[in-house]
Image (cartoon, helix red, strand yellow):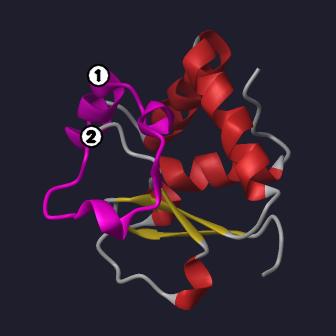
Amino acid sequence: MKRGVISTKRVYEPRSEDDGLRVLVTRYWPRGIRKDDVDVWFRELGPERGLIREWKTRKISWEEFKGRYLNEYKVSTEKKTSLEELKRIMKKGRITLLCTCMDEEMCHRGILKGLLLGKRGIHAG
């Protein structure tokens, strides 16, 4: 198993051999998902409730959502701690970040993947 590889998918997609550790990164448990569909749940890595609501009701743009989600890592010790723990887990092998969103390009799991990979332009404080 290749170390440090990250993929993303919808939690509703079936488990595959390539998933490695299936990591749910939503604030709330998704409907219809059994506990054995997920290996570990980092609820702290999901966006705050108010931010989710504003994005889903289109009160804010994607860019504003992204900036505010990243800012949560600057102010939340809980988020920073969970991110560091997930980085340690990632060093042991492949992980798949799971969320309910259809499109990774417009989902916090894509932002989180960038944070874990240390992408330029994405900072968590």
**Contact (Cβ within 8 Å) of mark 1 with mark 2:** no
Q: Give SS at disc 2.
A: loop
The type of residue carrying mark 2 is Tyr
Q: Residue 27: x, y in percent?
A: 34, 37
Q: Residue at x 52, y 53 (%)?
A: 109
How many callouts does the rendering have? 2
Q: Residue furthest left?
A: 32
Location of mark 1 (residue): 50
Quarter that holds the C terminus: top right
Q: Name the residue nearer the viewer: 14 or 46.
A: 14
Residue 83 lies, with reference to residue 88, above or below; the image says above
Location of mark 2 (residue): 28
Q: Can I make out residue 24 in this image? A: no
- Dot 1 or dot 2: first in sequence order is 2
Q: Magenta stretch: residue 33 in it?
A: yes
The type of residue carrying mark 1 is Gly
Q: Can I make out residue 36 in this image? A: yes
Q: Give SS at disc 1.
A: helix
Question: Which label belongs to residue 92?
Answer: none
Q: Residue 50: x, y in percent?
A: 29, 22
Q: Disc 1 to disc 2, how far (Cα)?
A: 13 Å
State the extent of the magenta-drawn residues as a range: 29-58
Single out the mark in the foreground, 1 or 2.
2
